Image (cartoon, rainbow, N blue to C red):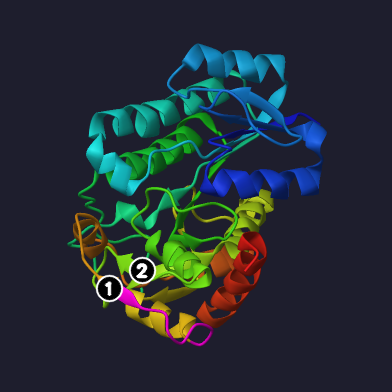
Amino acid sequence: MGTILITGGLGQIGTELSEHLISKYGSNRVLVSDIKNEASGNIRYTKLDVSDLNKIRKIIEENDVTDIFHLAAILSATGEKDPFLTFNVNLLGTQNIYKAAKEFNLNKLFIPSTIGVYGPTTPKDMVPEDTVIRPVTMYGITKISGEMLGEYYSKKFGMDVRGLRFPGLISYKFPPTAGTTDYAVDMIIHAVRGEDYQCYLKQDTEMPMMYMPDALDAVIDLYEAPRNNLTRFTDYNVGSYSITPASLHEEIKKYYPDFRVEYKPDYRQDIADGWPHSVNFSNAQKDWGFNPKYDLQLTVKDMVSNLKKKFKV
């Protein structure tokens, strides 16, 4: 069997997906790549800038790559600070992956998308995949374009491209980065450390979320599902529960009754206002058995337990 290449393998999803794939398929089959010069730990690693098509080709050829999990991307908040770089990495980089995959006749591509493809004119509750899609961030624009390219390559060239639209992801293993939903991770971290938290969203801002173990299971389950079972290509909705900063605060106070949160919305509030409150993931349930295990209560319980060990408090 050939090599599985992960781009963006040192990011929030990539870090944990790499561990997951190595555990499942063996370290000799998984090649992690990212823009950084080197990686820590005992993993096969190579530096890769996805805007460099020739480097992608070289890595595929030299490592007998048969499958790619393409996670390299600039996220929503950072994307608004440098939209031109975001376009180059998220869209042109994704096109490079598609092009190289076609040239080398790869087995499967997995390319995640996001609730960021929705926009202010999208309905807010139980949003299906097929609805109003008018994103207003460069992140969302590049992600919906990547989805459509994936469907095009699938239909035009017979490639097997799969993907899903992630909600906000919560994880204790990777520090908050530049996502609009990262307040959820940061709030719990502050509580465990005994620190007050200043939230950059309004307390009633509702968005769908998912705990990382459920997200990883979703990726693997979709990746391994028989193609004939799938009715969609790159845009399966997934999610577990919806929260607001206020509801998360209340759940955290079960463990830290004196934990305080101050609300000072910034530019990320405008991004969050364009995203849905909840999504309909019935297609994922029907087609490949998507079944999230963590609700908000279990998520916070597990986060607190693991963060206490991590920070030795």
Q: Main secondary structure of the magenta part?
A: loop
Q: Is residue 188 above or below residue 252?
A: above
- The reply, left or right, for residue 91 in relation to residue 160 is left
Using a 10 Å C-alpha cutoff, classify the residue at mark 1 as few (fewer than 14 neighbours), some (14 to 19) or many (20 or more).
Answer: few
Residue 220 is situated, as x and y percent measured from the top left of the image, at 66, 53
- The reply, left or right, for residue 272 in relation to residue 43 is left
Question: Which mark is first along the chain, 1 or 2?
Answer: 2
- The reply, left or right, for residue 144 in relation to residue 41 is left
Nearer to the camera, 141 or 132:
141
What quarter of the picture does the N terminus occupy?
top right
Residue 205 in sight in this render = no
Circle on res. 262: 1
Mark 2 in CB contact with mark 1 (< 8 angstroms): yes
Magenta stretch in the rendered image: 254-261
Residue 75 is situated, as x and y percent measured from the top left of the image, at 37, 44
Nearer to the camera, 30 or 109:
30
| Residue type for callout 2 | Tyr
Circle on res. 214: none
Q: Which residue is mark 2?
A: 197
- In the structure shown, which secondary structural element does the residue marked by tag 2 occupy? strand
Residue at the image position 77 percent from the left and 33 percent from the top: 29
